[in-house]
Image: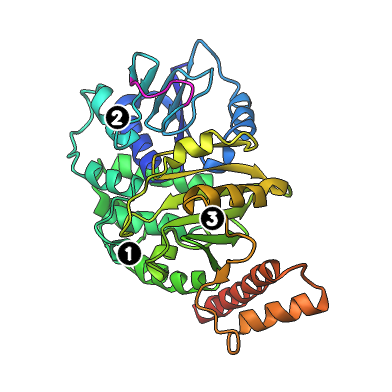
Amino acid sequence: MDKAHHIVFHDDIDGIISAAIYLHNNVGDDTYRLYPVASTSRGEKFEAMVKAMWLKPESDFLVILDYENHRDSSLWIDHHWSKVIGDEPVINSKIIYNPTATSAARLISKHLKANPNVQEYSETFLDMVDVIDHSDYKTINQIFSDTHPLMLLRAYIERSFHSDMMFCRIVEMIANTHFNFRKALYQLRLSKRIIFDLQKDVERTRKAMVVSGSMSIIRQSRPGKYPRYAEFYINPKVKYSVRLSTISQDKIYFQVGHNKWHEESNEVDIGRLLSSIGYLLNGGGHYSVGGGIVLNKDTETLLDDLCINLNDGESSMSDEMEKVGVDKENDPIESKAESMVKTGESKNIDEARKKAAESADEKKEEVDAKEE
């Protein structure tokens, strides 16, 4: 059998472009399979996925891009800081690792030799990949208004229910059009309307957001339910954001990020902070953004620890948490939440607000679906 490339890639813009570059430049006529993986699939889930590949040493080549390494990998390329390897870059035939690199896509483009038989392409798009992966936008408004093809693709991914086939088709379309993104998006039937839909989603975020000190907290029933960075767009005074997403009965996926447009700079290495918290199932990231998985029973402990580390050493979870933009007399969410607490349907006001907001979101989604 011909050589088979098993290409694992993170299901974000950097991972998608990394996979497209590898597919375009290094696969040629060989057989390949694409495996998009979410941040929530690290650890045991990732181990099970690799095991299910039934890799044959004589013909299968496991490539892991912009994601955690695996002992069976033939080639691993990543720019996320690893507590196992540390700060120094490692470049050899099996590992291309550099925690100072701006993106995995740029690492691939720099260190992997292109197939001389493939069509050349411009690498100018890598600048936008770097911007997106590091949230290095000029202003918060750029996120919700920029119509650059990669920003449109980012917005589409934000709003879509993720599926393996969706990510695989995007990677293949980008590679097959030789990184002509406007042509790729046209063939994927994606347009500027995505930005308008994203702006509508921001308003839904407002009702689900609470603030503790300089930190906002959003609890969501699934990852990506609300647009990323909406917290900073809604309330520019928020310095850090925390997202908690239910991924199973006993596990929560969390994301932590610094508001780059805040008047105060970030002085906390979020990636290393999360790597050092012992009770997390996994955790890590970059200096100003990170995430991981925590058991449901440890969620409040995590929030308290984050408050202490991100709110200048003072925890304010118990008595200072306030809902953003709430008019207690006229807000139907708040009224319903208070009613749920009084009737015993919810144990506390925070739980009640979450249930009331989710119920309102479901009704709004039903109305939006009927209108469309």
Residue range (magenta): 83-89
Residue picked out by circle 3 = 243
Residue 69 versus residue 112: which sits nearer the camera?
69
Residue picked out by circle 1 = 191
Question: What is the spatial separation of the Cα atoms under label 2 and label 3, in whole angstroms?
Answer: 29 Å
* Lower sequence index among marks 1 and 3: 1
Q: Quadrant of residue 114?
A: top left
| Mark 2 secondary-structure assignment | helix
| Mark 1 secondary-structure assignment | loop
Is residue 114 in view from this perspective?
A: no
Please determine whether, in this image, residue 216 is positioned above or below residue 117.
below
- Would residue 119 appear left or right of 330 to someone viewing this image? left
Going by the numbered disc 1, the residue's amino acid type is Ser
Residue count near mark 1 (Cα–Cα under 10 Å), binned few <14, some 14–19, many ≥20: some
Q: Residue at x 33, y 26 (%)?
A: 98
| Mark 3 secondary-structure assignment | strand
Residue picked out by circle 2 = 107
